[in-house]
Image: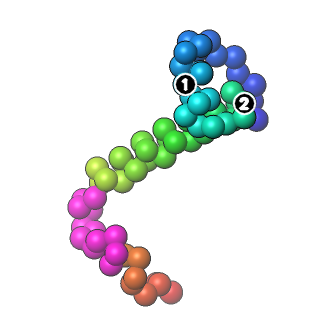
Amino acid sequence: MRRTNVTLPQDLVDSLLETTGAKNKTKAVLEAIEDYLQKKRQGEVKRLFGKGGLELSFDELRHREPRE
């Protein structure tokens, strides 16, 4: 893990701690960053849906036989 110093508004940090229920600021910030990155990746997947010749729904993909 890398140590980084960041200056954040105290009210934002307080709100983050309250919202996440994290026991410390580091855990709260890590959770917020992970959530942000996950949402960005999901948005990218949604943007690409229907492109590239893949016309299967999520359920069809989930239930199809594995390739060998």
Q: Nearer the viewer, residue 38 or 53?
A: 38
What amino acid type should be assigned to the residue bearing mark 1? Answer: Ser
Mark 1 residue element: helix
What amino acid type should be assigned to the residue bearing mark 2? Answer: Asn
Q: Seen in the image, is 19 located left or right of residue 6? A: left
Q: Position of residue 10 (x, y in %)?
A: 59, 13
Q: Position of residue 47 (x, y in %)?
A: 28, 50
Query: Crowdedness of circle 1 by 10 Å Cα count: few (<14), some, many (20+)?
Result: few
Q: Is residue 52 magenta?
A: yes
Vertical side of 60 occupied by 42: above or below: above
Q: Are marks 2 and 1 in contact (CB under 8 Å)?
A: no
Q: Is residue 33 visible?
A: no
Earlier in the chain: of badge 2 and badge 1, it is 1
Name the residue beneath numbered marker 2. 24
Residue 15: mark: 1
Vertical side of 65 occupied by 16: above or below: above
Q: Nearer the viewer, residue 29 or 66?
A: 29
Q: Which residues are magenta?
A: 49-60
Q: Nearer the viewer, residue 27 or 34?
A: 27
Quarter of the rendering containing residue 58 = bottom left
- As measured in the structure, the alpha-carbon distance from the residue carrying label 2 to the one carrying label 1 is 12 Å
**Residue located 23% across and 61% down the image:** 50
